Image (tube, grey):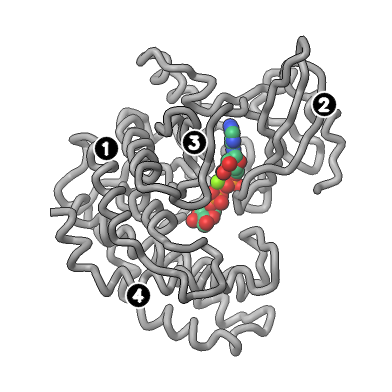
Amino acid sequence: MNNFDFEKLVGQFQAQGTFSGCKRYGEGHINDTFKVTMTEGGKEVHYILQRINNRLFPDVAKLMHNIELVTDFCRRSVLARGGDPMRECLTLIRTKDGQAYYHDGENYFRMYVFIENATSYQSVRAPRDFYESAVAFGSFANLLADFDASQLYEVLPDFHNTKVRYANFETAVQRDVCGRAKEVEREIAWVRAHKELCGKLVDAIETKEIPLRVTHNDTKLNNVMLDNATGKALAVIDLDTVMPGSLCYDFGDSIRFGCNSAAEDEPDLTKVHFVFDLYKTYLDGYLSAVGNGITAREKELLPWGAVLMTYECGMRFLTDYLEGDTYFKTHRPGHNLDRAHTQFRLVDEMLACFDKMQEAVK
Ligand code: ADP
Ligand code: GN1
Ligand code: MG
């Protein structure tokens, strides 16, 4: 675990109670997340403490400006419908001097209320959970339709611009800083053979065939909390990438992660399959919640969202492997390469049943 003085760190925030412990938490690939336990009146109170990935987000002030605006907006909507804002949205805990984050001179930290009696799943246990996550992300998109995009900084420009991602991939191949390109010739050739996919959504946005909206952009199943008691979706979390984007990105990224019969990093590819029935489940849930906002063309392009987000993510994992694993957290040698393989397998299987995927939308 990182060697921080957690008690001192937590003391910077307006958390209730006395510090009693802190442990690493969750399976995010980007930030360092910890669960903090405080005690007050003999009872435990929990918080999430995160060390923000400052390499990825060089301008933490802008990132946290976005998070403050989006969490405030969600909170107002939860209150308006008579919900419980401590469980149905992320609540930032400010520092003792009223800031949204704490800078210790080197690292940046933020704190959230811990959403109790809820789970963020790493894989789909039952179709119902996946349906609920679709409702959560669909409702989130619906809610954000009223959010003024001009207030947000684009903290990670071109985040889902697949053409830019492709260019970055080619640069990584050319530079080959770790000398790994030779070993992954087959994977590089596969990415190149699918290059024509890159423009599918980016071009549709550029020609205004589909609109840019405020979207979540990282809609993995483990970025949504489901209520342990009811199984219902409670809150969408991980708001670092709320930026202008497309509904097709959000739909697609959920499919990429949730319709995999195995884990994102499963090394045994015989276990990795695209589960078409789960795709249909998610589609039903998403369309039921996203409302009238979605245009006919966006709907048509949803299946492309699934293919594109999976292709792009695989390409990002491979790029990171070539660059020496500097972006995504890795826990073993070849971890990013295993991840890239699962994504490529899923794309192959999606393309093999693409007609069915389109038919389901109709
Ligand atoms: P990353 O950007 O690294 O993915 P996340 O913000 O998604 O970080 O947090 C990582 C994990 O921590 C989540 O997948 C979830 O399991 C857990 N988590 C994050 N925020 C909360 C919260 N407010 N309450 C409970 N669990 C949380
Ligand atoms: C990262 O932060 P996390 O683990 O929810 C990444 C996503 C990828 C995903 C792949 C800011 O998501 O874009 O799709 O890993 N987030 C960022 O699992 O790059
Ligand atoms: Mg996350």
Q: Gap between marks 3 and 4, in whole Å?
A: 30 Å
Please tell me the numbered disc located at residue 20: 2
Is residue 150 found left or right of 108 in the rendered image? left
Q: Position of residue 314 (x, y in %)?
A: 47, 68
Which secondary structure, mark 2? Answer: strand
Q: Gap between marks 1 and 2, in whole Å?
A: 42 Å
Q: Gap between marks 3 and 1, in whole Å?
A: 18 Å
167 versus 59 height, above or below: below
179 versus 35 height, above or below: below
Q: Where is residue 146 in the image (x, y as percent from the top left)?
A: 31, 28
Please tell me the numbered disc located at residue 348: 4
Q: Which of marks 2 and 4 is nearer the N terminus?
A: 2
**Label 2 environment density (alpha carbons within 10 Å; few <14, some 14–19, many ≥20):** some
Q: What residue type is labelled 4?
A: Asp
Q: Earlier in the sequence, mark 1 or mark 2?
A: 2
The answer to whether any part of residue 169 appears in the image is yes
**Label 1 environment density (alpha carbons within 10 Å; few <14, some 14–19, many ≥20):** many
Please tell me the numbered disc located at residue 225: 3
Q: Gap between marks 1 and 4, in whole Å?
A: 28 Å
Disc 3 CB within 8 Å of nearest ligand 1 atom: yes
Please tell me the numbered disc located at residue 290: 1
Which secondary structure, mark 4? Answer: helix
Q: What residue type is labelled 3?
A: Met
